[in-house]
Image (spheres, rainbow, N blue to C red):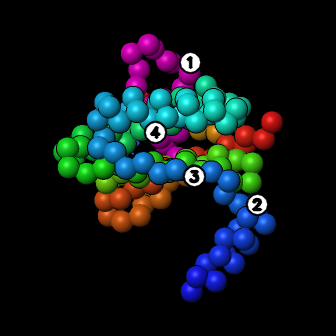
Amino acid sequence: MMISQSCQLQLDYKVGSITMEFTLNLLPDQRCINFIDEIMNTYLTVYNLPHKRELCFVVHELIINAVEAMEKVKKSETESIQINVSQKNGEIIVTVIDHAGGIEEENWEDVFQFDLEKMTYSDRGRGLFFVKNMVDNIWFQHLSDTKFLVGISKKVTL
Ligand SMILES: Nc1ncnc2c1ncn2[C@@H]1O[C@H](COP(=O)(O)OP(=O)(O)OP(=O)(O)O)[C@@H](O)[C@H]1O
Ligand SMILES: [Mg+2]
């Protein structure tokens, strides 16, 4: 058992897959938002990665959406959200999982629409529009009836 595990590790290393990964499980409140903001800022600075402002903004928006969704279903004091950040083959992948039921598949395209011409400063409903324009890929996944994943990836090769 031990031998096959170490072979698998070596294989992963040779094909150059994940070079960095961390996962956080946090209660979805204001401290969680502040904490992730700090973590992303520090992570991107220490590893000297490009697109720092965009990546910090994107993750901030996804966390706020998850926190708001969890508040809506009154789970923010009892269930955590999970944030996974990994670096793989020159790109950063971030996933955020909450337990608030997510977005209906028929609305997935609509949530990315926003008319900049009609924008006012008090508008809402534009977070995912900006997020989509700042990343290479964004995807949604229903993991169960309540568990919902939002993922983004962005190339960080200099
Ligand atoms: N994790 C989520 N779970 C459930 N619904 C979500 C989630 N993320 C986004 N949504 C839905 O998608 C809509 C659009 O999200 P978006 O971030 O673009 O705008 P917003 O959060 O309403 O406003 P803001 O401009 O402040 O971000 C939200 O109003 C919400 O209905
Ligand atoms: Mg939002």
Which residue range is magenta in the image? Answer: 109-128
Q: Is 34 colored magenta in this rendering?
A: no
Q: Which residue matches tag 4?
A: 62
Say whether disc 2 or disc 4 marks the residue closer to the N-terminus: 2
Residue at image location 29% in from the left, 35% down from the top: 29
Q: Which residue matches tag 2?
A: 16
CA distance for labels 2 and 4:
28 Å
Say whether disc 1 or disc 4 marks the residue closer to the N-terminus: 4
Foreground pick, 12 / 156: 12
CA distance for labels 3 and 4:
18 Å
Q: Chief secondary structure of the magenta span?
A: loop
Quadrant of the rendered image containing residue 66:
top left
Label 2 element class: loop
Foreground pick, 80 / 38: 38
Say whether disc 1 or disc 3 marks the residue closer to the N-terminus: 3
Residue at image location 78% in from the left, 66% down from the top: 14
Q: Is 123 colored magenta in this rendering?
A: yes
In the rendered image, residue 136, in percent from the top left (x then y), is placed at 68, 43
Question: Closer to the observer: label 3 or label 4?
Answer: 3
Q: Which residue matches tag 1?
A: 117
